[in-house]
Image: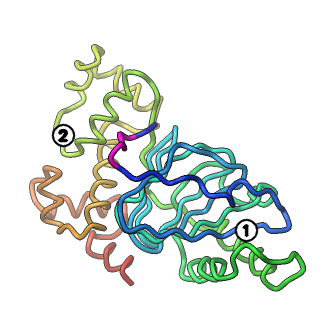
Amino acid sequence: MTIHNDFLTKIDPVAPGHTIDPQRPVLPYWQATENAMCSAPHAHPRGQFIYSSQGITRVMTETGIYLLPSSQAFWCPPGHQHELYFLGAVRIANLFIDPDWCDYFPINQCVLNVTPLAQELILRAIQIGTDYDSDSKDYRLMVVVIDELSGLKRAPLALPWSNHPSLSKILWQLFEHPASQHNVEYWAAMIHTTPRTLARLFQQEVNMTFSEWRMQARLLYALEQLNHGKSVTYIALELGYSSPSAFIAAFKKIMQKSPLEYISAIRS
């Protein structure tokens, strides 16, 4: 799954992801960009833990779209193809985990909530770098890093995807136009099927109802806009909500906090 990205500067995958060495369980790599950039679809034998310390990153895979705001992380298991989209100025800490150590992590891609302790360990790993011995203090700290990161809780920032020919057309339209008010009957007619069949297709392919998926797409759009400094009122109107309070209620239902509480949390 690839977004039209001809206007974006391309970056190459970095070498640490392809280095197999169980004696160096974690290979850290720091990335900083000032403008929007993207990577080509790629995979590597090491798992990749991506921590966003500033800015916002979107990760595209064959099975979903994942949003990575500041203070969140994304886990990509070894061999899973993915694309990275840096949406403006970002600061990213990459921790490439040797395959021998990846059994401690989730088997699927996911966004993770980063605890204050995990944040400090990530930044310490970046300071250590890739050159350390297996009998050193730095090695032991990297083992602690793995122990802490592998236990982080998931965040509801994933948008499941499908390669079903008919459904994927609808998903793209809803993703690119999150304010769309068209109902399931409209979309069913567009692909020449019945609303009941389309509803069943959503459940089979993305394990969500039509309304749940659209709400999730709107949430990801709202999070991107909040991270870019847009106001709650602006986002509510952009998404077609009847009032800012209606948007806040929908946001809080998924995120368990209001938009302003969310922004306050990531800024702190």
Q: Is residue 101 magenta?
A: no
| Tag 1: amino acid | Val
Q: Quadrant of residue 138?
A: bottom right
Secondary structure at badge 2 equals loop
| For discs 2 and 1, the disc positioned in front in the rendered view | 1
What kind of element bears circle 1?
Answer: strand
Name the residue type under label 2.
Answer: Ser
The range drawn in magenta is: 3-7
Q: Which residue is mark 2?
A: 180
**Image position, residue 104 (x, y; %):** 74, 60
Relative side of 71 to 145, left or right: left
Residue in the foreground of this view, choosing between 142 and 30: 30
Q: Is residue 76 left or right of residue 139?
A: left
- Quick one: 203 or 28, which is closer to the camera? 28
Q: Quadrant of the C terminus?
A: bottom left
Q: Which residue is mark 1?
A: 26
